[in-house]
Image: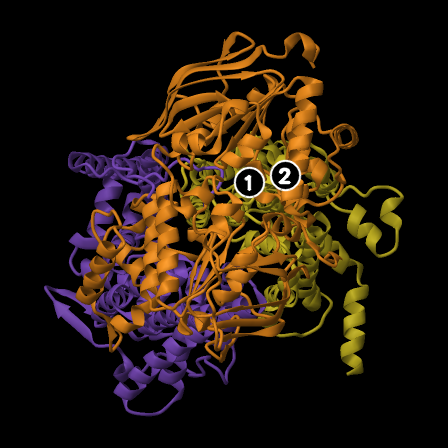
């Protein structure tokens, strides 16, 4: 803004070459320190419970990567997280704050369950149809928030969140209602509250490599991540989203209608979360059954991945693997006597830690003397 | 309140020695010496960027000096924040950004204090100051409902509340009508005589300084270049001192308030016939709160002419700018470009109709600092560089480089973020984009605000060139000098509608001043 | 149809319905009051959810260690404050994005509470019900408002206190100024980010108290799912209260009412789809927001971080 700060505009980072080097090294150092700090606090917590923190870290590592078959699991868990994260980046870049991924994911999984258990047909078609419908369901669910925002001014940060709770109830309803998704197989225990299992021909194919099994969905997710990265950076649609996210007024001025583009961005974001849910189900989550609690916080974690990756789709890939690793690693914690919750704590600490370096750098650059402020003309 | 004026007038209230401030490699103030005496109005004159504002901010505690000493009544001191300055008797009347719209007058005045909040006490103070200095204002009015002139009164009262001995006014008349400006100077003169104030009047208009001050210090490039008693000064010498070279161009003279009526008038009217390239008819719009933004506004711009829209800020300049940027849907009225009606408020409609707008605040609707220079340059025509959805990077870069050359934009490269460029260069980017899009109508809103004389000349020249190329130019500005220097035809904007028109050949600055204050020939416009 | 109406009348006429409205709404009101102050200062404090949970757990711990409800309430306040301080300092001293910090803080608290809960399972007993003589005899609303556990009554003085803080003190004036126009406040000599941090801290204190109230004054046990998204409802209450004190309280009460309705239905013997009931408060919140959001005026600088210009 012009105005009281009529002091000359300050460039945000030094232009001098060795200045740039130094700043990159300092930034890297900050990241290392922050991550170390987060892990240190986790270690302290573990120690407080009287357990060995090296043992915990080893268990996590084994559980995530080293033990046989584990990294396949890790990647399979990373897959829906990545999809959710990539979808979130689209919304965030367009300036919209979608935090309803958990609900959109459920909607996608639910539609997949409907197609997979209630409709007769060739397996491949059902699978593809289910994935597509799941995406549409997630997208439409997010679309509700878009309508509320653009017609009535309801902030999407609130409406997407409230819709999560509603989705949880819809899920509960679905698995307890016979005509909907409840498993009516008489051989199952009476109190079962879940859907029938997807038939084997509607399962997503599994890739076997080096003794690990991972769902084909992993490949799908990576391809989509790359595609979205390309779309955002190199196409006119991505350009429109970016302009909208930076400055909605300029967007309006140059013909990028906020309603149409924002709704589309929210739809895509919800659709990818819905796809994540559908893919999860078709890859064997909860034994191919849609259950209450199906989402297991994948939606929330995908959101965190996107935020940590600073809304860059390609960075989401390694970040999703890290977060997924923490999850699968937690499976090996039982033998160490440490509660699984330490993983949630570590995750949150890592996110906070990763927020610190960019903030410090930003502040430091504002204070620093900068070169080459040329004449005002 | 201090000693009676008779005994202290002429004594130094404030002395500055060697004040220096650097922002990176830029030296905003370089060893400035200044003395403010009691009972005197001291004009600080200099073009935009000369360092006057930075100097004053050091006095008020908003900026900390790198070097130099400040003496108040002979005692050295360090001023660390505005309330500290107030406790030393130094008060500043800000231009715009110091009042909170949502709060009332008394709440705003109370914001500048410490200690227990006393509503009635503050109201009383306001009433007594109002009466004493002739600045009438309702303590319980909400600031957002006040006009610019009344807001300034609130700013002054806020300043006077601390019973300052030293008053600093930074470009105070930019938001006032000529009548309000005169009233302000009367108030200042009264205070100087009665209370023995030491007043520093910062301005880039030498005619104003010649009229209202007793002594003048001229700054250029961060240094003091001349000091003179007002009675001994004249416009040409002041102008030369300000800019460092003879000032010949009419636009430059007008920018620093050196243009005489003779300079500005005289050019014969150019005849414009045929269909206007832009026509706004009976445009009316209200804000969400019901406030009137535009009130049956009508104007026409012909191809090749520069139409100036004069008026004090807050009378509809921003809504007009937003209308032509597709950001304001009209409740009634039409906008027609080259005979074709354009839907107001529809995204991109104005732009597609070849209406280019250079906004008053580039960060609002002018440019995106996080995107690259190239992307900003090509922002409005990105669709052209797309094949089947994919952006053609090389073409975009090539076109950007062309524009960078043509408009002499100083940038390390086309792909660096725009935010890295200096303010002036960012403005050039906005200008370049507007002019290169092949507009039929060019709307320039406050285009030279805050710019130094060289930049003012450049912009003025480009606007004239645009008109010469057959573009219809609509120049919206609160700076009368700028309008008078450039416009072929002058319209006056008051409370959302055009209430008067004047051709270049019949330019009458006095009548213009009256119109700006709302007085039409038929009496005050309601 | 007649059945339906008589059922509604039955529910609305039941004193337990009002009693639980005040309890559930009261819990929300603690958080919403605090969040109101934070939002008046121009910040959106998403970590209020975390503050509530931290307050609940620390409150439970305090009781567990000392057997005193009073101490539990104090430890709860401390817990809420700590979370708020994380939010305040990371967002308004370190310039990290306030939404990200808030969401992450919530996840952190959930994890920590779960982690420590597995080690120490606090045994809690609800506080005693203290009926205020006379007032609690007013028909229908008397017992609801004045026949509650004693921690509930802590809410009542907090309401005028918050009003006084916001509208009668210099601090409150500066908080409002900072939320409307931080640039102007800065020029007037106010430390914008400091006020924002303080406002968030106040929010954390109240949310911590609310969480402790939930465990010690209402439910009587601790569960990590206890808060269950109510922090976000509190934020919604501030929104549809139009950032006024009265509106915010009304919002909290309305939601509490909807929640109480959900609980009262089966208790009073009516059959109704469980999930629909559980979704009711959230649906109601959405409906209200759709209906009234457009007319509301929010603090002009809401959710806009402020970094001071160069000095």
Q: For this rendering, which residue is in front, C40 or B488?
A: B488
The extreme bottom residue here reads: A121
Under circle 1, the secondary element is loop
Chain drawn orange in the picture: B
Residue B349 at x, y percent in the picture = 45, 73
Residue B28 at x, y percent in the picture = 37, 29
* Residue under label 2: B181
Q: Quadrant of residue B384?
A: bottom left
Q: Quadrant of the C terminus of chain B?
A: bottom right
The reply to whether residue C60 is visible in this rendering is no
Say which chain tag 2 marks: B
Query: Which of labels 2 and 1 is toward the front?
Result: 2
Residue depicted at 77% across the width and 27% down the height: B132
* Residue under label 1: B97
Chain A image colour: purple
* Mark 1 nearby-residue class (10 Å; few <14, some 14–19, many ≥20): some
Q: Are marks 2 and 1 in contact (CB under 8 Å)?
A: no
Q: Is residue C174 left or right of residue C12?
A: left
Chain C image colour: yellow
Q: For this rendering, which residue is in front, B409 or A193?
A: B409
């Amino acid at each position: 803004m012009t105005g009281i700060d009529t002091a000359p505009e300050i460039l945000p980072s030094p232009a001098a070459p060795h200045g740039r080097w130094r700043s990159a090294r300092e930034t890297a150092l900050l990241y290392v320190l922050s991550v170390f700090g987060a892990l240190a606090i986790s270690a302290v917590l573990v120690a407080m419970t009287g357990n060995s923190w090296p043992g915990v870290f080893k268990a996590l590592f084994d559980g995530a990567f080293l033990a046989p078959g584990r990294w396949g699991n890790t990647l399979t868990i990373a897959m829906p997280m990545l999809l959710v994260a990539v979808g979130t980046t689209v919304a965030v870049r367009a300036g919209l704050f979608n935090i309803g991924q958990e609900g959109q994911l459920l909607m996608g999984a639910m539609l997949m369950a409907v197609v997979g258990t209630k409709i007769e047909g060739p397996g491949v078609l059902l699978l593809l149809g289910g994935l597509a419908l799941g995406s549409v369901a997630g997208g439409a669910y997010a679309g509700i928030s878009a309508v509320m925002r653009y017609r009535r001014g309801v902030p999407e940060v609130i409406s997407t969140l409230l819709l999560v709770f509603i989705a949880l109830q819809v899920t509960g309803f679905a698995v307890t209602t016979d005509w909907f998704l409840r498993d009516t197989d008489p051989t199952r225990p009476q109190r079962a509250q879940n859907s029938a299992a997807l038939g084997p021909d509607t399962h997503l194919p599994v890739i076997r490599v080096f003794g690990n099994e991972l769902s084909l969905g992993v490949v799908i997710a990576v391809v989509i991540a790359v595609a979205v990265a390309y779309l955002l950076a190199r196409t006119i649609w991505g350009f429109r989203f970016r302009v909208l996210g930076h400055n909605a007024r300029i967007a309006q001025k140059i013909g990028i209608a906020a309603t149409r583009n924002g709704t589309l961005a929210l739809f895509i974001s919800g659709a990818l979360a819905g796809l994540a849910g559908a893919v999860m189900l078709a890859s064997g989550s909860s034994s191919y059954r849609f259950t209450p609690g199906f989402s297991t916080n994948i939606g929330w974690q995908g959101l965190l991945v996107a935020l940590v990756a600073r809304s860059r789709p390609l960075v989401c890939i390694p970040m999703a693997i890290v977060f997924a690793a923490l999850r699968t690693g937690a499976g090996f914690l039982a033998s160490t006597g440490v509660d699984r919750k330490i993983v949630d704590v570590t995750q949150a600490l890592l996110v906070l830690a990763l927020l610190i370096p960019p903030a410090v750098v930003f502040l430091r650059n504002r204070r620093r003397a900068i070169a080459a402020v040329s004449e005002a003309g | 309140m201090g000693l009676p004026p008779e005994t202290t007038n002429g004594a130094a209230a404030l002395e500055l020695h060697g004040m220096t401030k650097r922002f990176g490699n830029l030296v905003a103030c370089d060893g400035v010496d200044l003395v403010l005496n009691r009972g005197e109005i001291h004009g600080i004159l200099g073009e935009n960027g000369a360092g006057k504002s930075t100097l004053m901010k050091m006095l008020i505690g908003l900026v900390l000096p790198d070097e130099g000493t400040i003496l108040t009544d002979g005692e050295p001191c360090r001023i660390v924040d505005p309330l500290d300055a107030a406790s030393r008797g130094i008060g500043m009347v800000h231009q715009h950004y110091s009042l909170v719209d949502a709060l009332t007058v008394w709440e705003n005045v109370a914001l500048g204090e410490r200690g227990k909040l006393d509503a009635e006490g503050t109201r009383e103070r306001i009433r007594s100051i109002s009466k004493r200095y002739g600045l009438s204002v309702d303590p319980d009015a909400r600031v957002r409902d006040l006009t610019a002139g009344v807001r300034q009164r609130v700013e002054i009262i806020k300043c006077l509340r601390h019973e300052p001995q030293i008053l600093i006014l930074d470009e105070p008349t930019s938001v006032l009508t000529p009548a309000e400006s005169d009233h302000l100077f009367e108030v200042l003169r009264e205070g100087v005589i009665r209370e023995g104030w030491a007043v520093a009047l910062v301005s880039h208009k030498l005619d104003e300084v010649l009229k209202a001050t007793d002594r003048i210090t001229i700054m250029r490039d961060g240094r003091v270049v001349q000091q003179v008693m007002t009675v001994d000064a004249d416009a040409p010498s002041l102008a030369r001192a300000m800019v460092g070279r003879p000032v010949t161009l009419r636009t430059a003279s007008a920018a620093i308030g050196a243009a005489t009526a003779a300079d500005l008038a005289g050019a014969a009217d150019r005849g414009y016939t045929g269909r206007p390239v832009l026509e706004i008819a009976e445009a009316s719009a209200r804000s969400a709160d019901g406030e009137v933004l535009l009130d049956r506004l009508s104007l026409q711009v012909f191809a090749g002419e520069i139409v100036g829209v004069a008026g004090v800020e807050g009378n509809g300049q921003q809504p007009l700018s937003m209308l032509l940027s597709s950001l304001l849907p009209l409740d009634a009225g039409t906008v027609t470009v080259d005979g074709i009606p354009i839907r107001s408020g529809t995204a991109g409609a104005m732009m597609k109709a070849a209406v280019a707008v250079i906004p008053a605040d580039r960060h609002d609707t002018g440019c995106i600092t996080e995107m690259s220079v190239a992307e900003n340059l090509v922002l409005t025509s990105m669709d052209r560089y797309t094949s089947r959805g994919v952006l053609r990077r090389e073409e975009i870069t090539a076109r950007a480089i062309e524009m960078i050359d043509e408009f002499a934009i100083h940038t390390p490269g086309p792909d660096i973020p725009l935010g890295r460029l200096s303010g002036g260069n960012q403005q050039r980017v906005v200008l370049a984009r507007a002019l290169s899009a092949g507009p039929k109508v060019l709307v320039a809103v406050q285009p030279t605000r805050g710019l130094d004389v060289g930049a003012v000349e450049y912009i003025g020249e480009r606007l004239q060139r645009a008109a010469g190329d057959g573009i219809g130019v609509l120049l919206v500005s609160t700076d009368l000098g700028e309008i008078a220097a450039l416009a072929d035809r002058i319209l006056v904007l008051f409370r959302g509608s055009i209430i008067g028109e004047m051709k270049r050949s019949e330019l009458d600055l006095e009548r213009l001043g009256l119109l700006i204050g709302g007085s039409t020939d038929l009496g005050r416009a309601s | 149809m007649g059945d339906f109406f008589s059922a509604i009348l039955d529910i609305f006429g039941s004193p337990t319905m009002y009693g639980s409205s005040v309890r559930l709404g009261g819990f929300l009101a603690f958080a919403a009051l605090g969040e109101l102050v934070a939002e008046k200062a121009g910040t959106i404090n998403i970590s209020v959810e975390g503050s509530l949970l931290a307050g609940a757990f620390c409150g439970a711990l305090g009781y567990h260690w000392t057997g005193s409800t009073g101490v539990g309430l104090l430890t709860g306040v401390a817990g809420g404050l700590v979370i708020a301080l994380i939010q305040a300092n990371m967002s308004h001293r370190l310039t990290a994005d306030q939404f990200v910090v808030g969401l992450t803080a919530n996840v952190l608290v959930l994890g920590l509470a779960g982690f420590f809960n597995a080690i120490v399972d606090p045994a809690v007993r609800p506080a005693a019900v203290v009926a205020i003589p006379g007032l609690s005899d007013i028909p229908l609303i008397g017992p609801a408002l004045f026949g509650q556990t004693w921690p509930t009554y802590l809410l009542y003085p907090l309401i005028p206190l918050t009003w006084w803080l916001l509208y009668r003190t210099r601090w409150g004036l500066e908080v409002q100024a900072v939320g409307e126009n931080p640039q102007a406040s800065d020029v007037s000599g106010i430390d914008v980010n400091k006020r924002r941090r303080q406002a968030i801290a106040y929010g954390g204190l109240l949310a911590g108290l609310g969480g402790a109230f939930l465990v010690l004054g209402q439910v009587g046990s601790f569960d990590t799912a206890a808060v269950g998204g109510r922090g976000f409802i509190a934020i919604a209450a501030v929104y549809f209260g139009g950032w006024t004190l009265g509106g915010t309280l009304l919002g909290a009460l309305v939601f509490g009412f909807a929640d109480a309705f959900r609980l009262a239905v089966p208790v009073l013997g009516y059959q109704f789809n469980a999930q629909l009931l559980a979704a009711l408060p959230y649906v109601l919140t959405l409906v209200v927001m759709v209906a009234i959001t457009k007319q509301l005026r929010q603090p002009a600088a809401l959710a806009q971080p402020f970094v001071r210009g160069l000095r």
